[in-house]
Amino acid sequence: MPLTSQPLDLPFSEACERNKQPLLEALRAWLPQPPDRPVHVLEVGSGTGQHGAHFSEHLPVRWQLSDRPEHLPGLRRRQVQVSATNASATTAAATGQLLLPLQFDVTQPDWPAGPFDAVFSANTAHIMPATAVPDLFAGSARVLAPGGLFLLYGPFHDGGVPTSASNAAFDAHLRAIDPAMGVRDSLELIACARAVGLSAAADLPLPANNRLLVFRCSPTGT
């Protein structure tokens, strides 16, 4: 059963519904705060759009949805529903803006035009092929503004060691489906980041044995 009421034609993830508030609090603490404009954020792999909808309601952001083609119809419906709700509200306008989704594949060289103050991606690194993970970091580094943040959420191992029994079981489940999938190792991700000029800034524990890894672009760019 969904945790909140949702229009029937919108995609829905119970996991997104559970983790959106802890993630919001982490983003509130870490997102850059330009003094004269909203924060411009690219979300890689927006899925159902629930994260973007929630964050754009509570944060001063221009939240750019993006995903592979099969997710775009549901994302468009989500964006239209959110925009219509904001437009019809009798109170002040929503804090942020949810932008129409872009078709996007991290392995392609043409990423959405930046610069972005932050790139956010949730529960994607363990689903995409292992060979695509360096592309995720390299592309993020290319489109980030100087000093911008890449924020990666999900379950992670540490030095080849699962951080919980549930993460070990999840990793085995993913690899049984496709050996190219699997829970990624935080040390390998830090190495990916360093190779493209991103530095590890924080490793934030979140509920259900997940974490938010924060990487920062050099103040002078990468």
Image: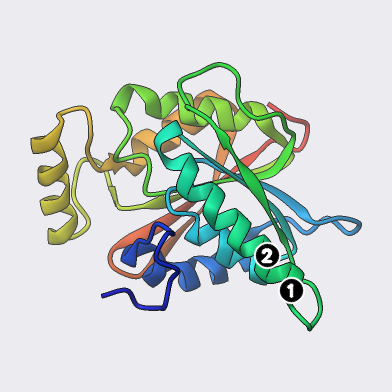
Q: Quadrant of the N terminus?
A: bottom left
CA separation in Å, label 2 and label 1: 6 Å
SS type, badge 2? helix
- Dividing the picture into quarters, in which one does residue 10 lie? bottom left
Image quarter in which the C terminus is found: top right
Label 2 sits on residue: 84
Labels 2 and 1 touching (C-beta < 8 A)? yes
Front residue (pair 159, 206): 206
Q: Residue furthest right?
A: 36
In this view of the protein, can residue 25 be seen by the observer? Answer: yes
Residue depicted at 73% across the width and 55% down the height: 32
> Of 216 and 11, which appears nearest the observer?
11
Give the residue at mark 1.
88
Residue nearest the viewer, comparing 30 with 72: 72
Q: Position of residue 163 (x, y in %)?
A: 22, 56
Instruction: Answer with left or right where residue 52 lies relative to residue 177.
Output: right
Residue shown at 28% from the left, 68% from the top: 208
Local secondary structure at mark 1: helix
Q: Quadrant of residue 141?
A: top right
Instruction: Name which residue type carries label 2.
Output: Ala
Q: Please, what is the three-letter code of the amino acid marked with disc 1?
A: Ser
Specify the label residue 102 is tagged with: none
